Amino acid sequence: MISYFKNLKRSDYILFLVIFVISIIMIRSLDLLYIETQVYKSEIEKREIKSDIIQATRGTIVDRNGSILAESMLTDTLGVKSTKIFFEENTEESLKKLCIILNKKYSHFVRDLKNKEKKKFIYIGRHLLPSTVKKISELNLKGIGYEKEFLRFYPEGESTGNLIGNTNKEHIGKIGYEASFEKHLKEQNGKKIVRKDRNGKIVDHISLIIAPKDGDELKLTIDKRLQYVAYREIKKQAELVNAKSGSVVILDTTNGDILALASYPSFDPNDKNSYTTEKERNRAIMDSIEPASTIKPFLIAAALHSGKLDLKDMFDTNPGYKKFGRKKYKDTKNNGIVNYEDVLIKSSNIGSILISQEFDKEIYHDLLEYVGFGEKININFPSESGGKLDHHSYWHATDEISHSIGYALKVSPLQLAKAYSIIANEGIVINPRIIKKQSIRKDKKQKYEKSFSKVKYVLEKVVEEGSGKRASVKGYSVGGKTGTAEKYMGGKQKKYNKKEHTSLFAGIIPIIEPKLVIVVVIDEPKTKPNEFFGGHISAPVFRKVAADSLRILNISPDKKMDYQKQVSTMFENLDNYTLKTPEVPYVF
């Protein structure tokens, strides 16, 4: 064997070495090709093949006509991917320009980034407008990147702010209908397997794991046009009289659809800086108020239903005040001897108390319960008020008196609107609804028909010749009732503040063939003495809201003679007017 190796030539050694090297290479190649392929393949897949979220969209909220009240928009969110690159490869000047664009203080901006430098992606600007993104791209910054995020947008702003509500950063409903219908509106993101390049860009879609599901649409009975009109007018009047707050409800008497629930003050859900807990409250739904004289039509209806009251019955209210028990009650003036119509028209407290003593309190309580006082309407709104109506067995003598003039019980403006819609429909109960797909909630029974029919007739007189004159709308029959409640202070003596009031007006229009009930409430108006009454403060708001609402809904005047007279007067007042463009319709 040794002699064999001695006889080998140098070339043989070289050949042997070459064969050995080639063998090693071939063995290694076969190992890489057939044995370690799966190992390297799995390593590559770990780097390139990843799961990716498929973003679904939160459900849209729309009004009765399909106009958008809340929708989700895909926007760009800016972040820093590497703080080292960001600070080393960008000039201080360009970073300061970025801070100006993002409305950030440079020193705070730098400090915050350095505190979060261990994070992979640091958010520095969320939900940016396209114009903002364009300005930032012109700076050619290094170490930044964009992510797509949904932004909830509310086209109607503050007019629907405390009704629709808003969402938080995670796109979860926070208040209003955004919160109460979270499950209905909530989207379900999907999941897929994709291949990404080293820059994180998707280059191939491999498979779908979970399909995305967008949130469901929520259609409300609200009409955004009427909502805007109601909010505009309540805001204008509340600011004019320096009131604490105000609300307007517009209800369709034919089907119970809630057309507007405006509340002031409100906030713009598109502007987080405009939000306060005070502005979040939708007072049309959440506030409980003592209805004051707006309760009197129900007292009269109950008295008529009892059979103990007739138009011939007269009540002596002289000399404008009377003592019942230990307390003295008064009217705004001496109304003398009145019948039940006069009690409503002149809004006599003394007359109301005298009428309440003519019949059983149980009848009055049952009627109030029938129209919905003391019971939630259940429109799926957070913290909806159910009001307060104690059982008649708990009423003492003073409670009977208080109930007759609208105290010792509480209602929300929405509950009051429902009650007046029952007057409008002469005893038929159509429960208000705000979700359009819900069926019309009309009760089969009808009670107090004759009583409410008589009351409805008197309510028209209240507007024509009584305390509600400022609520009249030319060309239309209007019925309604004013109310002015002193604010309850509480305490052992259960006193009321004679300097702070809630001014109300509840009306039906047209009164002959009712279409709308509108309730206006203004809390704590700061006015001159004797100008805080509902007829002065809230009735004018009713008139403006009603006039615009009727025009928008294309409801024709039912008092055509008055309407024609109004138009004729307009023409008579035109001095030497020449119609130069006769082809233009509705020029006047």
Image (cartoon, helix red, strand yellow):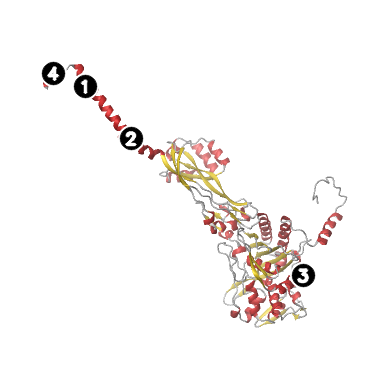
Residue placed under numbered mark 1 in the picture: 16
Please, what secondary structure does the residue beneath circle 3 have?
helix
Three-letter code, disc 4? Lys
> Sequence-wise, which precedes: disc 3 or disc 1?
1
Residue placed under numbered mark 4 in the picture: 6
Mark 1 crowd level (few <14, some 14–19, many ≥20, 10 Å Cα): few
Q: Is residue 50 left or right of residue 562?
A: left
> Sequence-wise, which precedes: disc 2 or disc 1?
1
- Whether residue 531 appears in this view of the structure is no
Three-letter code, disc 2? Thr
Three-letter code, disc 1? Phe
Mark 3 crowd level (few <14, some 14–19, many ≥20, 10 Å Cα): many
For residue 544, the mark is none
- Looking at the image, is 445 positioned above or below residue 16? below
Q: Tell me where residue 321 appears, x and y as whole percent.
A: 72, 79
Mark 2 crowd level (few <14, some 14–19, many ≥20, 10 Å Cα): few
Q: Nearer the viewer, residue 369 or 161?
A: 369
Please identify, in this view, whether the residue under mark 2 or under mark 3 is nearer the observer: 2
Mark 4 crowd level (few <14, some 14–19, many ≥20, 10 Å Cα): few
Residue placed under numbered mark 3 in the picture: 461
Q: Quadrant of the N terminus?
A: top left
Residue placed under numbered mark 2 in the picture: 37
> Sequence-wise, which precedes: disc 4 or disc 2?
4
- Whether residue 35 appears in this view of the structure is yes
What separation in Å lies between label 2 and label 3 (alpha carbons)? Answer: 95 Å
Q: Is residue 369 left or right of residue 471?
A: left
Q: Is residue 445 left or right of residue 173?
A: right
What separation in Å lies between label 2 and label 1 (alpha carbons)? Answer: 30 Å
Please, what secondary structure does the residue beneath circle 4 have?
helix
Three-letter code, disc 3? Lys
